[in-house]
Amino acid sequence: YHGMDDYDDDYRKKGLNGDDEIFDDYFEDDEWERIHNHVDDVVLAELEYLNGALDRSIFIWRVGLIVSLVILFGSVVFIAILMERRNRVIDMHIREVVEEI
C-alpha cells in the first residue's frame, strides 16, 4: 500500500525510524491504548447516559420476567390444587358406589 510508505517517509524526515518502535510488538498494543487514547468528557457522559438507560431497561425486563414466572408457577399450583379437590370428590363418589354394591 503506497500510502503507508508516505507515512513512514514523513517519519524518516523527522529523524524517526518508521513507525513508533516502542509499540511495534503485539503485546504492547494495550500499553499504547492506555497511553494514547483518552476518553473525551462528552463521550464519557454519553456512555454513562446510555449505561443508565440500559440499566433501567434491564431492571424492567428482570421485573417483568420475575412477575411472569410468579404468575406461571402460581397458576400451576392453583390448577394442581383444583385437580386434587376434584379427584377427591370423584374418589368419594366411587367409594359410595362401591359401598352400595
Image (tube, grey):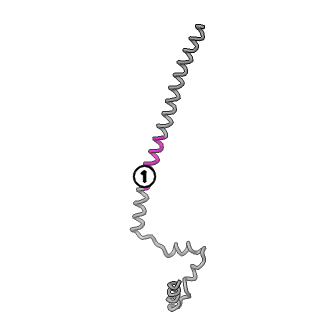
Q: Which stretch appears magenta?
A: 54-68
Q: Is residue 86 above or below residue 34?
A: above
Q: Nearer the viewer, residue 48 or 2?
A: 2
Q: Is residue 81 magenta?
A: no
On the rendered structure, is 39 left or right of 80? left
Q: Main secondary structure of the magenta part?
A: helix
Q: Is residue 67 above or below residue 54?
A: above
Q: What residue does disc 1 label?
A: 57
The secondary element bearing badge 1 is classed as helix
Which residue is at 55% across, 74% downward? 31
Q: Which quadrant holds the C terminus?
A: top right
Which residue is at 53% across, 83% downward? 1
Which residue is at 56% across, 88% downward? 17
Residue 9 location, x and y as percent?
A: 52, 89
Q: How many marks?
A: 1
Which residue is at 50% across, 90% downward? 14
Local crowd at mark 1 within 10 Å, few (<14), some, or many (≥20)? few
On the rendered structure, is 49 left or right of 11? left
Residue 95 location, x and y as percent?
A: 58, 13
Q: Quadrant of residue 24?
A: bottom right
Residue 48 location, x and y as percent?
A: 42, 61
Q: Is residue 35 above or below residue 71?
A: below
Q: Quadrant of residue 25?
A: bottom right
Residue 54 location, x and y as percent?
A: 43, 56
Q: Amino acid at mark 1?
A: Ser
